[in-house]
Image (cartoon, rainbow, N blue to C red):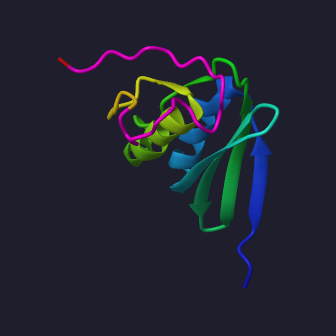
């Protein structure tokens, strides 16, 4: 039996509210995926009894930024650190921040060449 899936396009400004709706409905976070097209395309996937919902949003490639969803789904910290390191997305207010050291990479944001990554303070 196939699991029903729905893709819902959202504005980045609606991310926290839409993620909270998924949490309130009892859905679990399945994954967060990013890819580089003309813009960055992100998909936040949630599973509930009725199927899978993908929240999809686009970000500019030059200085991408999003709020963290770790206050809603704590386990998202791994996906968010990955998006920062590999795509140069500035994730604001992440609860577990590896400060650009989640992956050992030879160049910043290798999947989004030319991205201007904001400087993050190293822990004292």
Q: Is residue 24 magenta?
A: no
Q: Is residue 46 left or right of residue 71?
A: right
- Towards the viewer: 89 or 22: 89
The magenta-colored residue range is 101-123
Q: Residue at x 69, y 19 (%)?
A: 62
- Towards the viewer: 1 or 68: 68
Tell me how many marks there are: 0
Q: Is residue 86 left or right of residue 57?
A: left
Percent x, y of residue 3: 71, 74
Residue 103 falls in which quadrant of the image? top left
- Locate the N terminus by quadrant: bottom right
Would you place residue 45 above or below residue 58 in this image?
below
- Locate the C terminus by quadrant: top left
Q: Is residue 36 left or right of residue 98?
A: right
Percent x, y of residue 47: 59, 61
* Residue found farthest to the left: 124
Q: Residue at x 75, y 69 (%)?
A: 4
Percent x, y of residue 68: 48, 30
Residue 63 falls in which quadrant of the image? top right
* Residue found farthest to the front: 106
- Towards the viewer: 105 or 46: 105
Task: Determine the main secondary structure of the stretch shown in magenta.
Answer: loop
Q: Is residue 118 magenta?
A: yes
* Residue found farthest to the right: 38
Q: Is residue 83 left or right of residue 123?
A: right
Would you place residue 36 above or below residue 4 in this image?
above
Percent x, y of residue 100: 40, 30
């Amino acid at each position: 039996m196939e699991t029903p899936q729905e893709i819902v396009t959202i504005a980045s400004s609606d991310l926290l509210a839409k993620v909270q709706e998924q949490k309130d409905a009892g859905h679990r976070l399945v994954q967060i995926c990013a890819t580089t097209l003309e813009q960055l395309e992100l998909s936040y996937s949630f599973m509930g009894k009725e199927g899978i919902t993908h929240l999809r949003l686009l970000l500019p490639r030059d200085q991408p930024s999003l709020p963290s969803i770790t206050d809603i789904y704590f386990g998202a910290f791994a996906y968010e650190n990955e998006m920062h390191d590999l795509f140069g997305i500035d994730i604001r207010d992440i609860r577990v921040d590896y400060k650009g050291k989640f992956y050992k990479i030879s160049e910043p944001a290798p999947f989004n060449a030319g991205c201007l990554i904001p400087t993050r303070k190293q822990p004292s």
